Every structure is written in structure tokens, then in C-alpha cells.
Image (cartoon, rainbow, N blue to C red):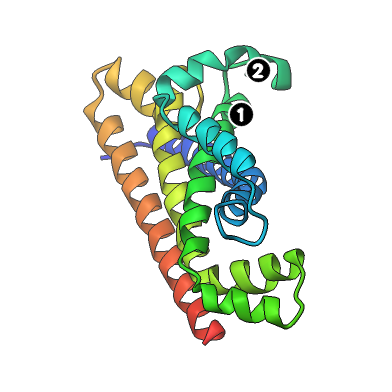
Amino acid sequence: MIDSWLMERLLVATWETIYMVATSTFFSYLFGLPLGVILVITERGHIMENKVVNRVLGWIINATRSIPFIIFLILIIPITRLLVGTYIGTVASIVPLTLAAIPFVARLVETSLKEIEWGLIEAALSMGANTWTIITKVLLTEAKPSLILGVAITTINLIGYSAMAGIVGGGGLGTLAYYYGYQRYENTIMWATVIVLILVVQGVQFLGEKLAQKASKNRG
């Protein structure tokens, strides 16, 4: 039986998680999307081939992705404190969540854009399209369904990351589960947070699939 206290804590923690994840997803795409585009257009034989940029950027992204999130969370505490004044709390958690997701987003975007047939790009080039037009009107437009699914995947991953951030006082459902559930041996709280997390993840996945299907039909 869920009492009023637990219900109130669940609602607050769920809102904190949604806020953290939504904000982190937005900023990770704000920076990760351009990086993914650069990875694609600078590769060999593409419209802005540049081996040095491609290799250096690829190495940085791979190196960052190799660091487990819980370690990454601790490593960037000075950066988090510099940006928001503290490394504890919901707002502070947005910094490591965003920085950890940027390289992940870049690779997702790269994969999505590489699915575009070269013939479409070649046709645009033959019609005199410039680099910006090819990126916006060909690459991003044609890859829209895949990119939307990528947003859903990123959001789901960030939900998991936010739970880990909660263990070190990041707020949200992770903090509720660890401090009020695990440390106090309250199984009801543990299971309640797990159920909420499952529902949120399923909702994100469902919404992502529906939006991707809609984008695919509109493109067709």
C-alpha cells in the first residue's frame, strides 16, 4: 500500500528525473548533432573530406565514451561546480548527464546519416546544392525517422544515467531509491521507483516509435 508521503516523494522525484533527462537530452543534441554531422561530411569521399578533423574528432568521442558514467560523474565534479556552483542536486546532475551523452548522440547521428544513399547526395550536388543545403535538405531531412528514434534511445539511456547520479545526491528517482529505499531497507520504495522508471521508459519508447513512424510517412 502506497501512503501519501511516498506518493508525494514519488511525484517530486519523477518530476526531477524528467526535468534532468529532458534538459540533458536537449543540450546533448544541441552539441552532439553538429558533431555527428561533422563526422559524416568529413569522412573519406564525402562533401567536406578532412581526414585530420575526422580522426581527431572520432578519437575524442571514442575516448569520452569509454569512461564509465559513474567515474565520469566524479571526474568532472570541478567542471560541474564551476558551471552551477555545486555538484549535488538536480541542476548539477544536468552537467555530467549532458557531457556524457554528447559523444553518444554524435555516434547515433553519424549512424543515422550514413544510412542515406549516396545517390541522393550526388543528385543534390549535380543540381548545384551547397554544403548547408545538403546537410539540412538531404541528410537531416532523409534521416529524420532514424534521428527521432535516436532521441528516444538517448533519453532512455539518460534515464539510466540519472538513476546512477542519484546515488551521489543527484536527485530524482535514483536518490529516492537509494537513500529512502536501499539504505532504510524499504522494499516498497525500491519497487515503486522501479515501476515508475519502467513506465517512463516504456512511454518514451512508445512516443519515439510513433513520432518516427509519422515522420517516415510524411517523408514518403
Q: Is residue 180 above or below residue 145?
A: above
Residue 45 point in image, percent of width and height: 57, 59
Residue 117 point in image, percent of width and height: 49, 74
Q: Is residue 85 above or below residue 149?
A: above
Mark 2 burial class by Cα count in 10 Å: few <14, some 14-19, many 20+: some
Mark 1 burial class by Cα count in 10 Å: few <14, some 14-19, many 20+: many
Q: Nearer the viewer, residue 6 or 202?
A: 202
At horizontal 66% and vertical 50% (from top left) the residue drawn is 34
- Label ID, residue 17: none
Quadrant where the N terminus sits is top left
Could you tell me the amino acid type at mark 2?
Ile
> Quick check: marks 2 and 1 in contact, CB under 8 Å?
yes
At horizontal 34% and vertical 37% (from top left) the residue drawn is 193
User: Image check: 89 left or right of 153?
Assistant: right
For mark 2, give the secondary structure. Answer: helix
Q: CA distance from mark 2 to mark 1?
A: 8 Å
Extreme residue toward the top, this view: 78
At horizontal 49% and vertical 84% (from top left) the residue drawn is 217
For mark 1, give the secondary structure. Answer: helix
Q: Is residue 125 visible?
A: yes
Mark 1 lies on residue: 95
Could you tell me the amino acid type at mark 1?
Val
Q: Please count the marks in the image.
A: 2
Residue 127 point in image, percent of width and height: 73, 83
Q: Is residue 2 visible?
A: no
At horizontal 52% and vertical 47% (from top left) the residue drawn is 105
User: Image check: 193 left or right of 112?
Assistant: left
Label 2 vs 1, first from the N-terminus: 2
- Label ID, residue 79: 2
Q: Nearer the viewer, residue 36 or 70?
A: 36
